[in-house]
Image (cartoon, rainbow, N blue to C red):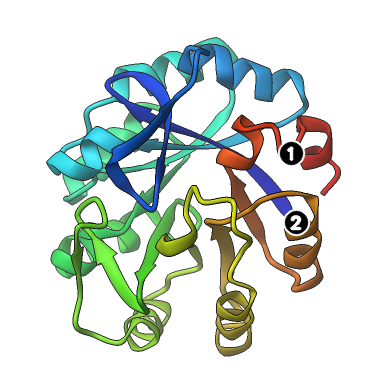
Amino acid sequence: MKVIPAIDLLDGQVVRLKKGAYDDISKYKQTPAGQADLFRKAGFDHIHVVDLNGARKGRFVNLPVIQKIIAETDLSVQSGGGVRSFEDAQKLIKAGISKIVCGSMAVKNEREWLKTLYHFGGEACIMGLDLKDGKIAYSGWEETADEDAFDFLQRMVDEGLQEILCTDISRDGMLTGVNLELYKSLIKQFPELKVIASGGVSGVADLEDLNSLNMHAVVVGRAYYEGHLSLGEMKRF
């Protein structure tokens, strides 16, 4: 299992939200590029960056900040938040982002999402499966879709999807532990799919539990920033 450190960006600053709420923000002192360089020095070569402004506004806002991270650290970056069209995805890939994470576009504009998936392939396109009370959430997690999440996912797998980032919103940023049952169900139903867990990691025990499921990867944010996990502990996996 790979541990992927996270940087969430709001107005160019490193922040974390609780349950995706924009009115419950923790800000951190490191600059985005400075934080990314700490991850690089610890031995990580790939990070997860979210454009929170973009997720809410529907257009990618923090791209210059992410380009600065890439230029100064040479890290591989997967990023999402505000990717709403094929042209948006194309712009990010051209800017040097290695993998694009799309959630809202897949739900709201399936035609554009599939065009993106077909063009760039499953290795470069990660679908964000963000779940709120069992339903797919999108548009900065402020709206939910009607279609059953697993039915929707099956259709996407049939179209060539290879990798998902699955977040249990109720646990995101809460340090309350990961939703193991959710990830067990996903792996059982979609054994060929690369599943990245996100939300709720509170310490080493959660990483060990996820590792025991043969999880492809896990994104770690608040647990690191709040001192519940060291970079050394994260790098063990």
Tag 2 near tag 1, CB within 8 Å? yes
Image quadrant in which you'd find residue 26: top left
Q: Tell me residue 115's x, y (percent).
A: 23, 61
**Residue at the spot of label 2:** 207
Mark 2 and mark 1 lie on one chain; the one further toward the N terminus is: 2
Identity, as a three-letter code, of the amino acid under mark 2: Leu
Q: Tell me residue 104's x, y (percent).
A: 23, 59
> Under tag 1, what secondary structure?
loop
Please say if 106 is above or below 94.
below
Q: Residues within 10 Å of mark 1 (few under 14, many from 20)?
A: some
**Residue at the spot of label 1:** 229
Please say if 172 is above or below 211.
above
Quarter the N terminus occupies:
bottom right
Please say if 170 is above or below 225.
below
Instruction: Please identify, in this view, whether the residue under mark 2 or under mark 1 is nearer the observer.
Output: 1
Left or right side of 100 for 63: left
Q: Determine the residue positioned at 61% across, 36% down.
A: 46
Identity, as a three-letter code, of the amino acid under mark 1: Leu
